[in-house]
Amino acid sequence: MGAAHLFSAGRLLPDRRGRMASAESGLASGPSEELGRVLVLLREERGLSQKQVADLAEISNSTLSRLESGDRGVSREVLDRICVALQLDRHEELELLTAAGVLNQDAAQILADDDVAQIARVLHAPAVSPDDARLLRQYLRLALAHAKALGYKVE
């Protein structure tokens, strides 16, 4: 069973969640067995060794080994490097960030929705003018008002 399937099936444990993994790197999370389990699964799905991933992520093999065994915390920078090294898709990256404790389950589920992620990217793109962003947000409020009129709970 693939790691992306685990994420989409909602089987992640709640509360989880770069470059050099040094003492001076700010840790985004403490040690996590769930992070280790997800890292091993993602790495093995790609047929990569620990050394290959560590080299690609520019971290020591020892660091990756300790992450996979749940014996050390991790910085967001190291997580980002591992995501790039493993060539994770957005859902796999969200799963890894959740497992590491960087992202909570609710936020990950929201960001896993392709439409929500796309509108968030558009709204935060530097090229979007404030007037266009304001208009797009009005459309979102209109959609929420429509959902409420249909009887859905809208906060």
Image (spheres, helix red, strand yellow):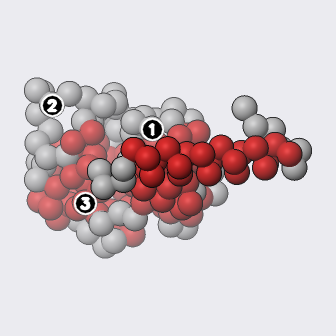
- Quadrant of the image for the C terminus? top right
Report which quarter residue 55 is drawn in: bottom left
In the rendered image, the residue lying farthest to the front is 131
Tag 2 residue: 25
- Residue 87: which numbered mark, if any? none
Q: Decide: few, some or many residues near mark 2? Use Cα within 10 Å; few <14, some 14-19, many ≥20.
A: some
Local secondary structure at mark 3: helix
* Residue at 54% in and 61% down: 114
Report which quarter residue 29 is drawn in: top left
Earlier in the chain: of badge 1 and badge 2, it is 2
**Relative vertical location of residue 142 with respect to residue 155 in this rendering, above or below:** below
* Residue at 53% in and 49% down: 135
Q: Decide: few, some or many residues near mark 3? Use Cα within 10 Å; few <14, some 14-19, many ≥20.
A: some
Q: Does residue 41 appear to the left or right of 87 in the view shown?
A: right
Earlier in the chain: of badge 3 and badge 1, it is 3
CB-based contact (under 8 Å), mark 3 and mark 2: no
Local secondary structure at mark 1: loop
Tag 3 residue: 84
Q: Decide: few, some or many residues near mark 1? Use Cα within 10 Å; few <14, some 14-19, many ≥20.
A: many
Relative depth, front residue between 113 and 144: 144
Residue type at the position of mark 2: Ser
Relative depth, front residue between 17 and 148: 148
- Separation of disc 3 and disc 2 at Cα? 18 Å
**Residue 81 appears at what percent x and percent y?**
21, 52
Local secondary structure at mark 2: loop
Residue 96 visible in image: no
Tag 1 residue: 103
- Separation of disc 3 and disc 1 at Cα? 18 Å
CB-based contact (under 8 Å), mark 3 and mark 1: no
